Image (cartoon, rainbow, N blue to C red):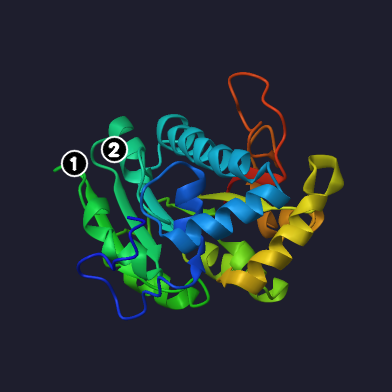
Amino acid sequence: MSDGHTPSGGSARLNTGVAHNARVWNYWIGGKDNYEVDQQVGEHVAGMFPIIRDIARADRDFLGRAVRLVAEERGVRQFLDIGTGLPTADNTHEIAQRVAPDSRIVYVDNDPIVLVHARTLLTGTSEGVTAYIDADVHDPDAIVERAAQTLDFTKPVAVMMLGILNFVLDYDKAREIVRRVLAAVPSGSHLVLTHPTFDSELGGEGQIPAMKFWNENATPPITARSGTDIAAFFEGLELLAPGMVSCSQWRAPDSPAAVPQYGAVAVKP
């Protein structure tokens, strides 16, 4: 979709003249739902910070392992995926419903091109439910209110926040978003989270200039955080083994290199 044409059904908010995160991310993982401007910015960022493609793939692989864990080992049948991004292979609902066909999934995003592709997401098993709501991560109360139309908040929910809180630039606001969403779900619910870091032990120093370029040339603006700040999102929760580590190494079947993106799964006691 790099011919510069707006996809049919496109939103008035769709701006193909400015690179956008969902489309650039899609480009990095080899997808087709992006425009020339996204490819140009994506290539420039990758030139500054070559590991970005590895981060994108590692984040996607982490999603698969985390959803399978939560569905298979933890028995969770409800998923609230906030900031889902563009549909690719093995989305949350496909993985969860492969484990348990009656799983219920609500996707949340406010990205115009994701909305265009929502119909692709809205296909799941006949036994389960796959729903999509247009809402902003900055408005957690609206997310909870609308998700409650599909999910039963008296039963455990896996709250998925993969690579989304890095778009909430105010740290206190980001923590409040997590608190408000987790307050709405019962004991036994899970938080599945990834977040980019500038910590040097994970090779994150290169995030800083790359994100500066991004913020000057693309949207929405983004920030990395320290491992200490990211760990605080899990306050009051119980981290599952192996705790908070590079998302590429979280329960990985082999021994991949670390990427500067933390990942963890925690349970609400």
Q: Is residue 189 visible?
A: no
Q: Amino acid at mark 2?
A: Gln
**Dot 2: within a 10 Å radius of its alpha carbon, few (fewer than 14), some, or many (20 or more) residues?**
many
Q: Which mark is residue 38?
A: none
With respect to residue 98, does 160 lie above or below? below
SS label for mark 1: loop
When the figure is inspected, residue 207 is found, relative to residue 249, above or below; the finding is below
In front of the other: 61 or 192: 61
Residue 228 in percent (x, y) is at: 81, 55
The dot on residue 97 is 2
Q: Is residue 225 above or below residue 65?
A: below
What residue sits 38% from the left and 44% below the top? 92
- Label placed on residue 125: 1
SS assignment at label 2: helix
Asked whether the beta carbons under mark 2 and mark 1 sit within 8 Å of each other, the answer is yes
Answer yes or no: is residue 52 visible.
Answer: yes
Of all residues shown, which one is farthest toward the right?
Answer: 200
Residue 217: quarter of image:
bottom right
Q: Residue 171: x percent and y percent?
A: 71, 71
Residue 229 lies in quadrant: bottom right
Q: Please give the name of the residue rendered at 18% of the width and 41% of the height, measured from the top-left corner.
A: 125
